Image (cartoon, grey):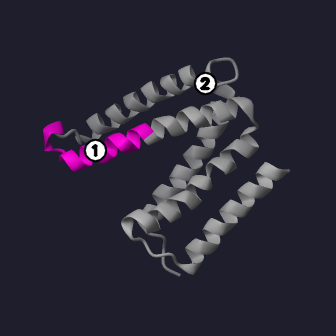
């Protein structure tokens, strides 16, 4: 068996930190407005990413970013912000053990969107995995 590509390690890191996000977020929104909590989280994220860019010397002139790139990054930012607002409100209202897994329906949606908009091919492993995520979310919501 081949060792996982570097993207797999980053994806696993993303999953690990997303799990911590759910746990810390649930605790963090217990006594605060969920929208304010999302704002605080966003400010922290900006500071952390700015520090990483500075440490690694990766700042670039914003003029070098193409208009198409700007457009899609702005859309991505809007989608992220709306997702976070919904997520923190859901955490405030529901148990983290249900909210976080249902939020991962985004994986199944991303599979469909990848096929529809960027021409990704559906393979049996991806179809099965996506279906299991949907089935798991249905089980979690229903019981």
Q: Residue at x 32, y 47 (%)?
A: 72
The answer to whether residue 61 of the structure is visible from this angle is no
Left/right placement of residue 72 relative to residue 38 reads left
- Read off the residue under disc 1: 71
Residue 47, horizontal then vertical, whole percent? 38, 28
Asked whether disc 1 touches disc 2, contact meaning CB atoms under 8 Å apart, the reply is no
Left/right placement of residue 125 relative to residue 91 reads left
Left/right placement of residue 116 relative to residue 15 reads left
Count of picture labels: 2
Figure quadrant of residue 94: top right
Q: Residue at x 46, y 40 (%)?
A: 80
Residue 55, horizontal then vertical, whole percent? 29, 37
Nearest the viewer among 60 and 85 is: 85
Q: What's drawn in magenta, residue-wise?
A: 62-78
Residue 89, horizontal then vertical, whole percent? 64, 30
Against 61, residue 141 (above or below) is below
Q: Residue at x 47, y 61 (%)?
A: 113
Q: Residue furthest right?
A: 143
Against 10, residue 43 (above or below) is above
Left/right placement of residue 138 relative to residue 60 reads right
What SS does tag 1 mark? helix
What SS does tag 2 mark? helix
Nearest the viewer among 88 and 28 is: 88
- Read off the residue under disc 2: 34
Disc 1 to disc 2, C-alpha distance: 28 Å
Residue 48, horizontal then vertical, whole percent? 40, 32
The answer to whether residue 113 of the structure is visible from this angle is yes
Q: Nearer the viewer, mark 1 or mark 2?
A: 1
N-terminal of the pair, mark 1 or mark 2, is 2
Q: Residue at x 38, y 30 (%)?
A: 46
């Amino acid at each position: 068996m081949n060792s996982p590509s570097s993207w797999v390690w980053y994806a696993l890191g993303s999953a690990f930190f997303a799990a911590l996000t759910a746990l810390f977020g649930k605790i963090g929104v217990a006594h605060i407005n969920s929208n304010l909590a999302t704002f605080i989280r966003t400010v922290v994220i900006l500071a952390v990413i700015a520090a990483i860019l500075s440490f690694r010397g990766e700042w670039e002139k914003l003029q070098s970013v193409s208009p198409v790139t700007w457009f899609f990054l702005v859309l991505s930012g809007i989608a992220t912000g709306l997702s976070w607002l919904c997520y923190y409100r859901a955490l405030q209202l529901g148990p983290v053990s249900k909210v976080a897994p249902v939020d991962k329906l985004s994986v199944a949606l991303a599979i469909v969107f990848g096929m529809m908009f960027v021409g990704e091919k559906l393979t049996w492993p991806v179809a099965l995995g996506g279906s299991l995520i949907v089935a798991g979310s249905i089980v979690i919501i229903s019981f």
